[in-house]
Amino acid sequence: MTIIGVDIGGSHISVAQINWNSGSIQLSNFSEADVDTSGSVDEIIDAWSDVIKKVANGKQAIQLGIAMPGPFDYQNGVSLIQEQGKLKSLYQLSVKDLLADSLSIGPEFILFMNDAEAFLRGESMVGAGRKHSNLLGLTLGTGLGSAIQVEEVLKDAKLWTAPFRDGIAEDYLGTAWFIGEAKKQYELEIEGVKDLLAPEVDSEISRSIFQKFGNTLGEFLFPYVSRLQTESVIVGGKISNASKFFLPFAQTYLERMGLELTCKKSELGENASLIGSVQPFFKNLT
């Protein structure tokens, strides 16, 4: 049986064969593609299937682990996404059955998982969290993904809507916050976090914004990591590419609050969700 990991985002798909060999994970036949997820059901499913078939390389006996953003009925494979602007044509449809038909496999060979949960499973299995049993994972980007692990239990934490300050967590811990902060405080127009690292941007301005974000991240994390006795916080997503500029401030904040834990950038990067999505297939091997 060939095991294939799939990471589906709002506008992309990444796919690879995942192999367990002598206690280590190996990826092969990696492929990715941009997908117009504002298209029809057939257009989206066909685009996804084409990449999966390419990675399967003619093999019919396959198992798929698919990391997918929410809201989504992961157990039954039904999309509940309707307000995010992407994948709307799949709303209330069984993506599991549609993909199974397109790939000519049984739906029982397809497993869906929240993308943040898949990220943390990958990092816990062979990445930055492999030496710990109590973890909190965050994917920072346009939105905020979160997952927690306490001993053997690992699940989506759904912290993006958690009340925080004058709103919810995602208001303060996503790309939109950086854009708003740069404009409000410095009249600086940016499209994303990477713009703050451009040579033409005053480094003191960038440092100030990242420091504020890091302190905010620490403040947000404190009640959760203290209650869960978290040993390590692992950060992924596009914003994590700038983690060296803000994670030290988050860790210092938590240390000042009396907590001993580490705040780390993902070791596996975009491969974390691919590996984590198939972790249940390898459970008997780990």
Image (cartoon, rainbow, N blue to C red):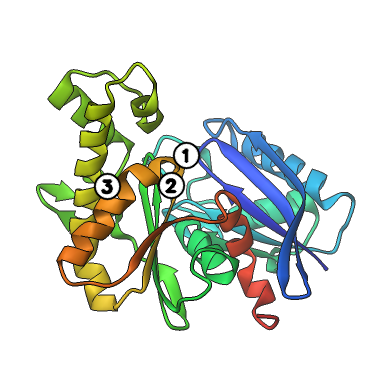
The residue sitting at 82% across, 52% down in the picture is 56
Q: Amino acid at mark 1?
A: Lys
Q: Quadrant of residue 156?
A: bottom left
Q: Name the one closer to the observer, 263 or 124.
A: 263
Secondary structure state at the residue bearing disc 2: loop
Q: Which residue is mark 3?
A: 170
The residue sitting at 68% across, 42% down in the picture is 48
Horizontal and vertical percent for residue 202?
Answer: 27, 21
Q: Quadrant of residue 207?
A: top left
Q: Name the one closer to the observer, 115 or 178.
A: 178
Q: Amino acid at mark 3?
A: Glu
Q: Which residue is mark 1?
A: 88
Horizontal and vertical percent for residue 243?
Answer: 38, 46
**Label 2, label 3: how far apart the Cα atoms are:** 18 Å
**Label 2, label 1: how far apart the Cα atoms are:** 6 Å
Mark nearest the camera among 1 and 3 is 3
Among the two numbered marks 2 and 1 on one chain, the one whose residue lies closer to the N terminus:
2
Q: Are marks 2 and 1 in contact (CB under 8 Å)?
A: yes
- Visible in this render: residue 94? no
Q: Which residue is mark 2?
A: 81
